Amino acid sequence: MQDKKEMLNHFRKRINFRDLGGYPTKDGSTTKYGLVYRSASVGLMDEEEFSILEQMDIKTIIDLRSEAEIQEFPYAEVKGAKKLEKCALVTEEGKSIDFSPNGMRRSGKDGLEQLNKLRNYYQHVCFHNASFQLFFDILLKEEVPVLFHCASGKDRTGLMAMMFLLAMDVDEEYIRKDYLLSNIMRKEILEKTLEGIDPKEEPILYELMLMYDGVSENIFDVTMQSITNKYPTREAFFKEEYGLDETKLKQLRLLYTKKGQ
């Protein structure tokens, strides 16, 4: 296992490649290392990073990008890995959002309209999402190690990581930490994007551009609140939205967490 942990050091921070192992759960267990990974698109990896990836015994890769993104930025097959493509955008509201620089670099009334669209998207994205359903099916079938990614490994990927950690019954504090870690991993990129934007003078523009190349804690809260507003417990959420009843959730937690790790 130590070898795989060392392999992670070969990825540049901007690739946002991470192991979701090591997070403590509410029953005193921790998520297992070496089974569930998240990252930016494999297509962004350089030759050394791609070579390291092929040494990690990845069995399944879930590509959360849209068909248009995949066609524009394809990547070579990863030896030994089955690739599944399932776009994580699920609502009409989400599909109508312009995530381009022009679409996000807005202020005033236009900026507020764009921000409201994004909030609405994140209020719905975790419900009946086919990509998340696929992910849990892979976990139950133990087709792991699994790597999931979108374009930059922060938004759609961040949400799927959130779903995994929620299902493992990790405390919200640690789920938030994992989500916001993208801002540290992509610090160099994010600082250039936010350069010259004063969050006090242009709060809407700042928030939008933060979301363009990083992640927003406000959006994390919106997403988590949408779940707690609709369901009294995590268990009720997973049973209704993804068919993960008590037996399946217990099975997942036995497979992907460990006591005393």
Image (tube, rainbow, N blue to C red):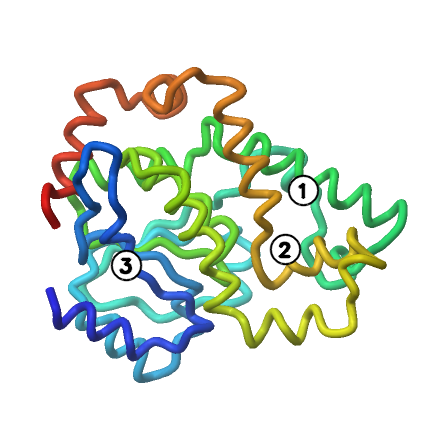
* Of the pair 247 and 165, the residue shown nearer to us: 165
Q: Are marks 2 and 1 in contact (CB under 8 Å)?
A: yes
Measured Cα–Cα span from mark 3 to mark 2: 23 Å
Quadrant occupied by the N terminus: bottom left
Residue 34 placement (x, y as % from top left) = 18, 58
What is the secondary structure assignment of the residue under circle 3?
Answer: strand
| Residue on which the image places disc 2 | 211
The residue carrying mark 1 is 118
Residue at 70% x, 45% y is: 97
- Sequence-wise, the earlier of marks 3 and 1 is 3
Number of residues whose C-alpha sits closer than 10 Å to that of mark 2, classed few (under 14), some (14–19) or many (20 or more): many
Q: Amino acid at mark 1?
A: Leu
Whether tag 3 and tag 2 are in contact, CB under 8 A, the answer is no
Give amino acid for label 3.
Asp
Element type where label 2 sits in the image: helix
Label 2 is placed on what type of residue?
A: Met
Whichever of callouts 2 and 1 sits on the residue coming sooner in the sequence is 1
The kind of secondary structure element at disc 1 is helix
Question: Which-is-in-front pick, marks 3 and 1?
Answer: 3
Q: Which residue is mark 3?
A: 19
